[in-house]
Image (cartoon, rainbow, N blue to C red):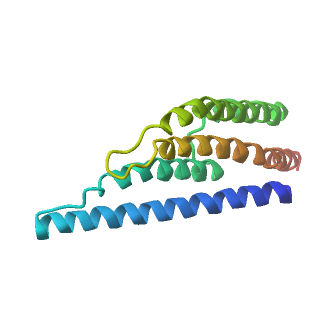
Amino acid sequence: MNPLFKAVDTVIGWWCHAVLYVTLSVVFLILSANVCLRYAAGTSLSWASELPELMFPWMIMSGVVIAAQHGSHIAVVILTQKLGAARRWVLTAASLVVAGLYLGLAYTAWPVFEIAADERSPIMQVPGSVSVGSLLLGFVMLAIVTLCRLPQVWRDEENNEVGAEA
């Protein structure tokens, strides 16, 4: 993989792992504390249901990006395995289409992001754009990760061709 692509991919992976660990930890701690308060004191934190709700989209999108980096998404490969030498071109075209669709989703999410900025959560008064921002940023990162993986597709295909010739 190109060193620049590898660096970008690594930074995105690091950022997504950090977001995933922080959001999971904070959500777990808040919900656990709230449950303890309910049973011990008969009361709860008023914001304890709202903060996990705001953090959940960030947790999901970071997991989606990490899954894309590891190739853990569902894929139907039976057709592409039968293509032979044309496989790398089909995979390249498919990756470009997928990256374009992710960028299209990000572009579509931008007006929603602007509209949601005016809405506030009831208790914490956090703008709605915080949640929509996870989608916007996640789609952009998915497009970048998809494009960064293109050289790997070509390298893997060259290795498969060399292995087939031997």
Q: Is residue 74 left or right of residue 89?
A: left
Query: Which residue corresponds to the image point at 50% horizontal and 47% vertical from the top-left?
Result: 130
Left or right, residue 49 beside residue 75: left
- On the image, the x and y values in percent for residue 3 come to 85, 60
Pinpoint residue 85: horizontal percent, then vertical percent.
84, 34
- Image point 59% across, 40% down: which residue? 136
Judge from the rendering whether residue 96 lies leftward or rightward of residue 29; answer left or right.
right
Q: Nearer the viewer, residue 67 or 109?
A: 109
Please tell me which residue is depicted at 53% across the width and 32% down the height of the picture: 112
Q: How many marks?
A: 0
Whole-percent x and y of residue 22? 48, 64
| Relative vertical location of residue 161 with respect to residue 103 in this rendering, above or below | below
User: Looking at the rendering, which quadrant does residue 98 occupy?
Assistant: top right
- The answer to which of 20 and 30 lies nearer the viewer is 30
User: Is residue 58 found left or right of 37 in the rendered image?
Assistant: right
Q: Is residue 81 visible?
A: no
Pick out the residue farthest to the bottom.
40
Question: Viewer-proximal residue, 106 or 12?
Answer: 106
Q: Is residue 3 visible?
A: yes
Up-down relation of residue 77 to residue 13 (above or below): above
Where residue 23 sits in the image (x, y, percent)? 45, 60
Q: Quadrant of the N terminus?
A: bottom right
At horizontal 80% and vertical 54% (from top left) the residue drawn is: 5
For residue 6, what is the image quadrant? Answer: bottom right
33 or 74, which lies in front?
A: 33
